[in-house]
Image (cartoon, rainbow, N blue to C red):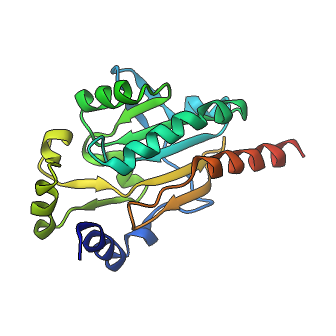
């Protein structure tokens, strides 16, 4: 069994997915620094329209990198529908900046040190000790990226939040290789826009 299967089984057996925010739940009003140290507040973004919140593990994760690039491609369509996009990881500021520069991201990438916000969304898990050597063998030294020894990560997840801070769509999967297709995000936002105008 490979690392992905081990980790997926751990997450499924933990029941963590059931603890994450669901459709209809109210999101916390997050305030986090972006790559340049400027604070970004969810409530202020919601003034102009819905917000797409994407939690990712870090720039060391190839699946996260593909997702971030896909979100950048979908950004014009997301903006056209009056929505904002933010991506959140537990990485320190240095790695957040390198993520933005590497992928030429023009949406906000926020640093959630110690997974404080991710915890409020119910998506934080700790890499079990017996799996850490497998992660290390891949060259993924989490303390170097996150600045702590907790070995905690968010489950990759995407939430679409309406202007009243309610979750209108939630994608949380125990298999971290599965991500919400940006095309689906645009479709969800289009449906929200249609409902609000009717």
**157 sits left or right of 126 in the view:** right
Residue at image position (58%, 47%) is: 182
Measuring from the top left, give residue 72's x and y in whole percent: 52, 34
Quarter placement of the N terminus: bottom left
Spot occupied by residue 136 in the image (x, y as percentages of width and height): 11, 54
Q: Give the farthest residue toward the bottom.
A: 13
Quarter of the image for residue 128 reads bottom left
**Is residue 165 rendered to the left or right of residue 94?**
right
Q: Is residue 113 left or right of residue 193?
A: left
Q: Nearer the viewer, residue 184 or 33?
A: 184
In the image, what residue occupies the spot 58% across and 30% down? Answer: 45
Where 17 falls versus 25 (above or below)? below
Residue 102: image location, x then y, percent: 35, 28
The quarter of the displayed image where residue 164 is located: top right
- Identify the residue at horizontal 26%, vertical 39% (top origin): 91
Q: Is residue 194 left or right of residue 116?
A: right
Q: How many marks?
A: 0
In-front residue for pair 47/187? 187
> What residue do we see at 57% from left, 29% from top?
44
């Amino acid at each position: 069994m490979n690392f992905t299967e081990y980790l997926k089984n751990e997450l499924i057996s933990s029941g963590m997915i059931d603890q994450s925010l669901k459709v209809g739940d109210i999101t916390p009003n997050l305030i986090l620094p972006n790559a340049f140290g400027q604070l970004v507040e969810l409530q202020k973004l919601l003034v102009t329209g819905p917000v797409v919140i994407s939690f990712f593990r870090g720039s060391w994760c190839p699946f996260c990198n593909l997702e971030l690039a896909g979100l950048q491609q979908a950004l014009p369509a997301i903006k056209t529908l009056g929505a904002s996009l933010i991506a959140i990881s537990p990485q320190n500021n240095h790695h957040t900046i390198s993520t933005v520069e590497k992928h030429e991201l023009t949406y906000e990438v926020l640093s959630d040190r110690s997974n404080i916000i991710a915890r409020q969304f119910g998506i934080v898990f700790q890499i079990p000790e017996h799996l850490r050597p497998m992660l290390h063998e891949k060259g993924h030294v989490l303390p170097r990226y996150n600045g702590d020894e907790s070995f905690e990560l968010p489950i990759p997840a995407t939430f679409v939040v309406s202007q009243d801070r309610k979750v209108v769509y939630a994608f949380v999967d125990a298999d971290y290789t599965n991500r919400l297709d940006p095309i689906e995000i645009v479709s969800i936002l289009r449906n929200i826009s249609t409902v609000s105008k009717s």
